[in-house]
Image: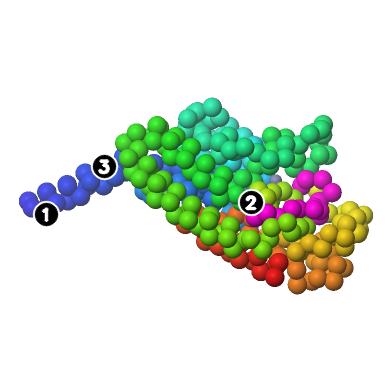
């Protein structure tokens, strides 16, 4: 009898936990990490990793299944996922993840975006960012703004989680503020220096660190570098004396290698993951620790 009572108790506890487990679909690992920080018991599915180009992924059936079962979805927005998210939303048939619903959260709606694309967008324009650069997570101050907006949203759609979410946000904010101060101190050596880059992947990182991107290996956003464009970048670079060439891990390294070699600075090519390397709590700190260290080392 006692065993039976214990078993029933365990079963009802299990059922209660099940009822509270929120399932979240995250388009990118930085947002998955943030969800796990604020709502540790959430069951999180992450659509992409740092090894992928978030503009271009395949809308696989497994992703459709994941978004179909989600109570909440978090993506960057600002058209970063324009090539695949609308298809997932449509095929999922899940009202909770449709645009305009409080359970469909777009991070880019909660910060100011830099560099909106001006001009006519044609099918040949490439991955232009009409609303502004969507790669906002590379600025930890904006990341914190998103964390605050996300905590408010989670508290309103899951009111029974609000107290815990708010406590987790306070802890996260204090920790990240301390790290931001330390990173900014470390990055003093970068003030006023220049860098050559590829795409707008780190577009928010440069101004935060005091760097200026003086040339882009892509002739147009999202378009692979061409020989003629690289020649132009080479001519420009020789005058600018940049700290180096920094590209994202998901870019083809060949054009950047060619340029670094021709500039006589093959050791000044830095290839970095464009986002966090895991989707667990603390991922942002682990990634930016690496980024700030590597970029400052380049300037030594
Ligand atoms: Zn982009």
Q: Residues within 10 Å of mark 3 (few under 14, many from 20)?
A: few
First in sequence: mark 3 or mark 2? Answer: 3
Residue at 54% from the left image edge and 27% from the top image edge:
100
Q: Position of residue 190 (x, y in %)?
A: 68, 60
Disc ID at residue 208: 2
Q: Quadrant of residue 83?
A: top right
Q: Earlier in the sequence, mark 1 or mark 3?
A: 1
Magenta span: 209-222
The residue sitting at the top extreme is 100
Residue 277 is one of the magenta-drawn residues: no
Circle 2 Cα neighbour tier, 10 Å, few/some/many (<14 / 14–19 / ≥20): some
The structure residue drawn at horizontal position 83% and vertical position 39%, both measured from the top left corner, is 124
Q: Residue 285, image x and y in percent?
A: 51, 58
Image quadrant where one finds the C terminus: bottom right
Q: Can residue 247 be seen?
A: no
Q: Which residue is mark 3?
A: 16
Q: Secondary structure at mark 1?
A: helix
Looking at the image, residue 271 lies above or below residue 158: below
Which residue position holds label 1? 3
- The foreground one among 154 and 124 is 154
Q: Earlier in the sequence, mark 1 or mark 2?
A: 1
Secondary structure at numbered mark 2: helix
**Of circles 3 and 2, which is in front?**
2
Give the distance between the C-alpha atoms of the residues marked 1 and 2, in whole angstroms.
Answer: 60 Å
| Res 111 seen here | yes
Residue 81 - label: none
Say if mark 1 contacts mark 3, CB within 8 Å: no
- Distance, label 1 to label 3, CA atoms, is 20 Å
């Amino acid at each position: 009898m006692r065993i039976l009572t214990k078993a029933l108790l365990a079963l009802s506890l299990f059922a209660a936990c099940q009822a509270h487990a929120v399932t979240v679909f995250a388009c990118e690992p930085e947002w998955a990490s943030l969800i796990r920080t604020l709502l540790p018991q959430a069951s999180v599915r992450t659509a992409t990793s740092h090894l992928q180009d978030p503009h271009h992924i395949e809308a696989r059936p497994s992703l459709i299944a994941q978004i179909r079962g989600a109570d909440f979805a978090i993506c960057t927005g600002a058209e970063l996922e324009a090539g695949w998210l609308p298809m997932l939303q449509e095929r999922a048939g899940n009202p909770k993840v449709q645009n305009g619903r409080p359970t469909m959260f777009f991070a880019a709606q909660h910060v100011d975006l830099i560099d909106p694309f001006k001009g006519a967008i044609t099918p040949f324009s490439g991955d232009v960012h009409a609303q502004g650069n969507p790669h906002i997570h590379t600025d930890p101050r904006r990341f914190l703004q998103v964390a605050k907006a996300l905590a408010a949203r989670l508290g309103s759609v899951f009111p029974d989680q609000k107290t815990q979410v708010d406590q987790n946000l306070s802890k996260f904010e204090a920790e990240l503020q301390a790290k931001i101060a330390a990173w900014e101190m470390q990055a003093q050596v970068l003030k006023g220096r220049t860098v050559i880059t590829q795409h707008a992947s780190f577009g928010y990182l440069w101004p935060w660190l005091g760097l200026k991107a003086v040339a882009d290996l892509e002739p147009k956003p999202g378009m692979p570098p061409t020989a003629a464009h690289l020649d132009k970048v080479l001519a420009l670079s020789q005058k600018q004396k940049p700290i180096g060439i920094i590209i994202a891990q998901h870019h083809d390294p060949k054009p950047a290698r060619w340029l670094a070699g021709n500039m006589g600075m093959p050791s000044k090519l830095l290839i970095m993951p464009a986002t966090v390397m895991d989707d667990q709590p603390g991922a942002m700190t682990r990634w930016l620790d690496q980024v700030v260290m590597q970029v400052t080392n380049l300037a030594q």
